[in-house]
Image (tube, grey):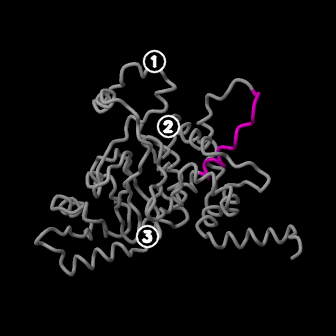
Amino acid sequence: MGQRGFWDEQQRVAKLQEKKPVLKRLSDSIPWDKFQPILDQGYAQDRKSNAGRKRIDPLILFKMLVLQQLFNLSDDELEFQVNDRRSFEEFVGLGVMNNIPDATTVALFRERLRKAGVIEELFEMFEAYLRSQGLQARGGQIIDATLVPVPKQRNTRDENKEIKAGRLPEGWEENPDRLRQKDLDARWVKKNGINYFGYKNSICIDVDHGFIRRYAITPANIHDSQMLPRLLDPENEHDYVWADSAYSGECFEDLLSLGRFESLIHDKGARNHPLSAAAKDLKSLLKNQPTSQFSTGISGFPAQKDGSAAIRAANSPISASLASLQGIG
């Protein structure tokens, strides 16, 4: 086998882009440079000296956050995959000779955007570009929620009591380094007999495109159904609403009826009251919707199935899950 030349590499990149049509479509249809002025606001208080390493282009980091949402990657996994996959590297805008930003850099960038308060503006702009490409929400909507575990906190019982009461434990405010490492918003919840500590990412996906149109990030102990009013998308061109039995109940049916939605929420089976054949068929339909290739991401981004949306930062949507950029904390 001979040594590959420049044109061989170009053909390889083209084939990789064909294998990832979502990345190719986003690269071609979104004017990414329009996001630059907003992203630069995260550097409004830039360093006073030019000494040290030059900062990484915010647009590169922003595209890494997009990849994180598309493929449900943690910060560490995102760093690895951009290093490992040429298609990811091309999408981000880096070549084989460039250094890939590490997980810590991605996390710090996300925090910069959160503190700059530009998350909503980024989402609105991205959604506007999607609509300009004819990607309006259609086909009805699927409502779902995913637990997003975060590292457990090593706090004393008294410290946890103060946190639950909405107060900072004594001495924490005087130790900013320690405070930065503490997650004050994550909560415990038990599901299927297993305890989880973290957040819950609730999303609304449009059926036709598989894009997340609305989202809500809450502590893990908030029940899925409480987010339904915030998730329903009145701009979807079709009225169907799919959801699992966590959203079942007369009050939710009334809510959907009031909003002129057609409920396809499947019933919950109970002892001595098994699901009917029709309910079982609806449950099967929900599992086999076109978005089965998806399941969690950010507003306007395709969501990947069985992932946590990578929203690991406290209260965040573009991390874990741009649904991670906004951070609860």
Secondary-structure class at tag 1? loop
Mark 1–mark 2 CB contact (< 8 Å)? no
Left or right relative to 114: residue 35:
right
Q: Nearer the viewer, mark 1 or mark 2?
A: 1
Residue bounds of the magenta highlight: 50-64
Can you give x and y, in whole percent of width and height, for residue 320 in the image? Answer: 49, 49
* Residue at screen point 59% across, 36% down: 42
- Mark 2 element type: loop
Disc 2 crowd rating (10 Å Cα; few below 14, some 14-19, many 20+) is: some
Dot 3 amino acid type: Thr
**Residue bearing mark 1:** 174
| Quadrant placement of the N terminus | bottom right
The amino acid on which the numbered mark 2 sits, given as a three-letter code, is Gly
* Residue 117, disc: 2
Q: Secondary structure at mark 3?
A: helix
Question: Residue lying furthest left in this view?
Answer: 272
- The disc at residue 34 is none
Mark 1–mark 3 CB contact (< 8 Å): no
In this rendering, the label closer to the viewer, 1 or 3: 1
Label 3 or label 2, whichever comes before in sequence order? 2
Amino acid identity at mark 1: Glu
Look at the picture and state if 42 lies above or below 207: above
Other-residue count near label 1 (Cα within 10 Å), few / some / many at <14 / 14–19 / ≥20: few
Q: Which residue is mark 3?
A: 291
Q: CA distance from mark 1 to mark 3?
A: 48 Å
Picture coordinates of residue 274 (x, y %)?
Answer: 16, 74
